[in-house]
Every structure is written in C-alpha cells, then in structure tokens.
C-alpha cells in the first residue's frame, strides 16, 4: 500500500471518531470494530445502520448496581474472590438461587433470639467454634457432641498449662524418657550373665588362695582326664562348687553323682513324664525342689533298653485307659503337686502363629493359655493349614486290617517337604505321623526325591542343631521344630469307608499323643489327612481318633471364623478410619489382644496407646518386653501417646503409613455435604 493511500484511509477513519475522544492504537481499534460489525450483521437484516440505543447509560448504571449487590451477597455466602461468585453464574442458575434466598424461611422467625445467643457465645470467646461449625455445616443433632468435645479440649489445655507433671503434653520428652528406660533396662538384663561370670571368677581367685592344696589336687585330676563326680568332690570339695556350680543329669545318671556333693536346689524338668521313683534320687539331695511339667501332654512311659525295629510296630503291653490315667496320676508332677505350692504358667512366649496356639489352647488347655497374635495370620499366612488328600484310598493291610500309608498321602507329604526346603531352608521341619510304616515310607520317599534335587541337599544332609526328621507320635514327645507336618498316615478303602485301625492314635492314651504332636510346632502346623472330620463316626472310633476329629473340626471353624472388632476406644476408631482413608487394611481389637493393627503391601504394624498398654502392666513389660515379643511375632510396633493421638490424629496416621513404607499415600477425602437451611 502506498503512503498516500495509507494517509487517505487514516483520515477517513478519523472522521468516525467522536469529538474529544483519543484513540491510541487506530489499527487495534479498527480490528475490534470489524469484529463488532461481523457480530452485528449476524443478528440484523442487511442494510440496517448501527446506532446507539436510547437509555444505554441507564442500563449501564443498573448493571453496576446489580453487580455491587451481588458482590455484597458473595460475602455471607462465602463466594467472594472465587471462581463461583454470583456475578459469574449463568443467568438461569443465578435467578434460581436468588429466588431461593428471597423466599420465606423459618430461620428468620427466631433471628432476634439467635442474634442474642451468638452475642453471648462471642462474649465467651467462642468465635473459633462458631466459625468452625459454620464452615463444616455441622448438623443440629451433632452440635451438642461438638460442644462437649470443645469443652473437654479446653479442660485438657487448662490441665496441661497448670500441671507441670504433664510436661505440657510434650510427647517428645516422654519418648526420650521411655527410650532411656528401655536402654537402661536392656543393659541391666544383659549385664546379669557377665555379672554372674565375674562373681564366679572372683570367688575362684579367692578360693585358689584360701585352698591351695585343693587347687593343686584339682589340677592333677584334670590332667589325668578321668575325672568324675566322686573324684572331683574328693579332690576339691570347696573349689568343685566353683568349677561346676550347676549339674545337668537325667534321672538315670543321678546315682553317679556323689551323695557328698551338697545342692541348694533341685529343678525337675518334664516332671509329668517321669514317676516319683525315678526322681527320688534327685529330690532327696536338696532342701528346695522346683518341679516343672505339662499335665496335658506328659505322662510316664516305660523306659526301653532294647533296639527297636523301625519297620514294624513296637512290641509292648497294651494298657487300658484306666491304667494310663493311674500312671498319669502317679507322675512326679501330680504327686509333688499335692504337697508343694502350685503355680500355673499361662502366658506363652513362643513366637508362633496364633491360629495354632488358640487351637491347642481351646482343645487341650481349656482356654487358660494367653498368647499374642502372629502377624502372618493378619497378612493372610495362617499358622494352621488343613491339607486334605483327595484320592487317599488304598487296600486294607492283611495283618492289621487298616488302610495304612496310601501312596497319595506319601506323595503329598514329600511335596510339602520339598517346598519347605526350597522356600524356607532356614526354618527347621519335622514330620509326625501316627503310623510307623508311614514314617518309614515318607523317609524313604524324601531321600529318593532329594537325590534328584541337588539344590536342597544341604537342608537334609548338612549338620544342623535341629535336623529334618520323620517320627511317630511316641518319638515326637521330646522334639520341637519351627514347622511341623502332621501326616495322619491312614486312609480310606476304595469304597470310601473308614476302618477302625489307627495304630497308637486309636488306643488308650492316643489323645495325649495327639496333644503332644500338635504342640511340637513353634510357627506353623500343616495337618495332612485323607479324611474329613465328618468321616469319623463316634460309635466306631475311640480315644485319639475322636480327639483328631474334634481338632479337625475346630481347625475348620477357626479358619472360617471372622474376628470381631471392638469400637469402644473412640480415638482408635477415628485413627482406624484415617488409616483406611490412606489405603491401609485395619482391624480393631485384633484377636482381643491388640488395640489396632494395620497392614500395607505385606507389612503389618501393631498400634497401642498408653491406655491399652498400661492396664496392669509394669514399665518393663509395657515398654520393653511386650514390644520385643510383638516384633518376634512379625509386627512392626508403634506406641502412641493419647495426648498426641487426641491433638493431631492425622499426623499419627501419616506416621503409621510411613512406617509401613506407604510414603506416597495421600488421604482419600470426600466432599463434605452442605446441610440446607
């Protein structure tokens, strides 16, 4: 475009500018005019000249007045300076809202009384409470609860401000004090053994000086390499007590210990398994006797000196139930219990599964044993498993008439053993069976399978403190392992019938053998059976077989049982809901032992408050022993102070999530519904 043409057009455009109006950017103004012209031609007929409507100034003044009124309404409605202000609403929605605000309301009928009440509340410095209730739109039926909570909060704040013993609810100070107590208590407990060793060493130094002749004689005796109890005592009657302050012996070795050696106390272990006659040699040697035993699983048995053929049933005299009961009543535990003060140890410290512990407790101990829950059960790894063999059929034996050691059960046990060796080689394993023939077959089948699996050879052949074994019920009495497979060893006929022959399990005393077998496991018990509890008929079975049916039935009920939750602790209930909002799985009053537990991606944590822990417990038990026990059971442990949980439950919930590795979780919040009116 030429310069002259440009000047002509600029002059023409300025003719349309009103007098007194200055246009800074003529090009930009022409573009806006062009846009307006396009819109104008879209809504009018062609050829109509644009003109300013009459009264447009009044319209602008009215618009400004309406906008000011809407901005005034935005303040009480909480919409000021937001994207949802009234001025930005579509006209239909705005008209509907304004009609609702202009309609008659019952709220206005008691406006004067409410204004006076609000004034009184503000005079009591309750403005924060009023603002909080209004912001959260608390329903009328919950206002009383909120007011009571506020009152108790103010009481707590007053107590914290005036009572110095509460440390101003500074939980960090409490945590430091508790940590110091744990360190001191651990050091005290760990120092007992070194202190005892130091005491014996000091006594030995003094004894060598006081009795040099005994020291020389003892030296010569030990050089000879043939010292026994009698020669040791004769050579050094004083120093021998320092060299051997504690003697360990079976009832049959007590006679080899000289009667001249004095003992302050005698401890009889497993006293339920021996008679008074067998322990008399030890009892008479001291003025104080402490007897320990288990009246459920232990009973005196014959002492065999002959080599037994493991491929056949053990020969022996069949005893009636009355004879076994009489023998049990004559045990050292029973007879001495009639003379000595008796205490029951009802708390189990075994780091095993609670499913197994509760089964044994309820079936054999009448619910007296107290045990803590195992984290594996909460995470879906139960400590009690029932493994039913589907095709557990076989032909009856010609000599015993029982269906014994069917191939399907042998193969299943071998599969479980190999699975344990591959996945849990650091845990010990024991296979227990009621059939001697089944024990031999399982042992042989395992050895054949191991010969083909080089990677598991060390588990079976390497020397260990608790090696793998396959034993019968009688042989399992003195053994224990981390995990036990209880393979019954008896099946059904091809027609599905159950025969009455169950070896020692079906004879008098079989119930005690079964009780001993199910208590051999420290962590987990797997029961392998070819039949279910309903297959056992009471009219044809007796003794341990009936007890086995009850155990299987109880185990099935236990695995299907859903734990009940206790919502009596309001703060733990609130914390559990916050943890659920974070995506954690929670359970209140878990198994009646733990106030709150939670899990996330294979990790479990036990949460306890000082109210839960401090009920009848000493500081040592609450701050050190109980947390250590729960950690051995697989739990992460967190003790929360009630002050902290009451003041900031959200922070406590986030701390629990972080402890379980849920560092990137955010609360799954929901919008608070607005209460109309």
Image (cartoon, grey):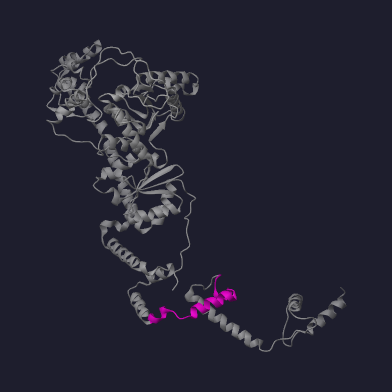
**Between 145 and 603, the one nearer to me in the picture:** 145
Query: In which quadrant will I find the N terminus?
Result: bottom right
Judge whether 169 appears above or below 232 on screen: below
Camera-side residue of 12 and 612:
612
Picture coordinates of residue 552 (x, y %)? 35, 34
Residue 290 seen in this snapshot: yes
Quadrant location of the C terminus in the rendered image: bottom left
Residue 449, compared with residue 108, is above or below; it is: above
Q: Can residue 102 be found in the magenta stretch?
A: yes
* Relative height, residue 253 to residue 15 (above, below): above
> In the visual, does 489 lie left or right of 242?
right
Magenta residues span: 83-111
Observer-nearest of 52 and 664? 52
Residue 289 seen in the current view: no
In the displayed structure, would residue 649 be above or below residue 419?
below
- State the count of labels: 0
Instruction: Identify the main secondary structure in magenta.
Output: helix
Where is residue 5, by image quadrant?
Answer: bottom right
For residue 364, which quarter of the picture?
top left
Specify whether residue 468 is painted magenta: no
| x and y, in percent, of residue 31 in the image | 75, 75
Please name the residue shown 48% across and 74% down the image. Answer: 77
């Amino acid at each position: 475009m030429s310069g002259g043409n440009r000047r002509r057009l600029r002059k023409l455009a300025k003719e349309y500018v009103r007098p007194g109006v200055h246009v800074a950017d003529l090009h930009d103004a022409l573009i806006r005019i062009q846009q307006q012209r396009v819109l104008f031609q879209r809504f009018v007929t062609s050829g109509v000249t644009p003109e300013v409507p009459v009264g447009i100034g009044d319209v602008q003044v009215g618009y400004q007045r309406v906008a000011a009124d809407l901005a005034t309404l935005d303040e009480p409605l909480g919409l000021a300076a937001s994207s949802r202000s009234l001025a930005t609403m579509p006209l239909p929605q705005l008209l509907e809202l304004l009609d609702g605000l202009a309609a008659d309301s019952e709220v206005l009928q008691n406006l004067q009384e409410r204004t006076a009440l609000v004034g009184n509340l503000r005079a009591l410095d309750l403005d924060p409470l009023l603002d909080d209730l209004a912001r959260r739109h608390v329903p009328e039926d919950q206002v009383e609860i909120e007011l009571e909570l506020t009152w108790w909060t103010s009481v707590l704040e007053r107590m914290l401000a005036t009572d110095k013993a509460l440390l101003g609810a500074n939980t960090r100070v409490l945590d430091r004090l508790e940590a110091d107590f744990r360190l001191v208590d651990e050091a005290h407990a760990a120092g007992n053994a070194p202190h005892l060793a130091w005491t014996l060493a000091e006594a030995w130094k003094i004894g060598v000086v006081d009795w040099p002749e005994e020291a020389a004689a003892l030296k010569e005796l030990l050089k000879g390499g043939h010292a026994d109890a009698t020669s040791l005592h004769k050579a050094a009657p004083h120093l021998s007590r320092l060299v051997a302050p504690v003697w360990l012996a079976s009832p049959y070795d007590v006679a080899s210990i000289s009667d001249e050696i004095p003992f302050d106390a005698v401890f009889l272990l497993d006293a339920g398994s021996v008679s008074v006659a067998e322990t008399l040699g030890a009892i008479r040697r001291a003025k104080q006797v402490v007897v320990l035993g288990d009246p459920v699983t232990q009973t005196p048995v014959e002492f065999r000196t002959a080599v037994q053929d493991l491929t056949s049933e053990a020969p022996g005299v069949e005893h009636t139930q009355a004879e076994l009961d009489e023998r049990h009543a004559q045990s050292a535990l029973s007879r001495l219990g009639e003379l000595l003060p008796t205490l029951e140890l009802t708390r189990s410290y075994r780091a095993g599964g609670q499913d197994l512990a509760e089964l044994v407790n309820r079936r054999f101990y009448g619910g007296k044993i107290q045990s803590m829950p195992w984290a594996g059960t909460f995470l879906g790894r139960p400590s009690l498993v029932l493994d039913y063999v589907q095709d557990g059929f076989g032909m009856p034996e010609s000599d015993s008439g029982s269906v014994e050691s069917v191939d399907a059960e042998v193969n299943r046990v071998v599969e479980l053993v190999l699975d344990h060796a591959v996945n849990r080689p650091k845990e010990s394993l024991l296979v227990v069976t009621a059939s001697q023939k089944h024990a031999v077959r399982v042992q042989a089948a395992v050895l054949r399978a191991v010969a083909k699996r080089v990677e598991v050879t060390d588990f079976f052949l390497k020397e260990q403190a608790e090696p793998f074994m396959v034993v019968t019920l009688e042989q399992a009495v003195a053994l224990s392992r981390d995990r036990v497979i209880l393979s019954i060893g008896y099946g059904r006929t091809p027609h599905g019938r159950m025969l009455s022959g169950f070896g020692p399990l079906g004879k008098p005393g079989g119930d005690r053998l079964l009780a001993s077998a199910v208590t051999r496991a420290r962590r987990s018990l797997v029961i392998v059976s070819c039949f279910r509890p309903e297959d056992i008929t009471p009219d044809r079975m007796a003794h341990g077989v009936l007890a086995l049916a009850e155990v299987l039935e109880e185990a099935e009920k236990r695995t299907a049982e859903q734990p009940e939750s206790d919502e009596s602790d309001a703060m733990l209930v609130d914390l559990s809901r916050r943890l659920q909002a974070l995506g954690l799985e929670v359970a209140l009053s878990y198994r009646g032992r733990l106030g709150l537990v939670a899990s996330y991606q294979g990790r479990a944590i036990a949460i306890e408050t000082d109210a839960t822990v401090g009920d009848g417990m000493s500081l040592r038990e609450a701050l050190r022993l109980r947390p250590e026990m729960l950690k051995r059971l697989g739990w992460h442990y967190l003790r929360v102070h009630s002050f902290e949980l009451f003041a900031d439950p959200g922070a406590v919930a986030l701390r629990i999530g972080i402890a379980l590795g849920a560092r990137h979780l955010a609360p799954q919040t929901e919008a608070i519904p607005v209460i109309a009116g």
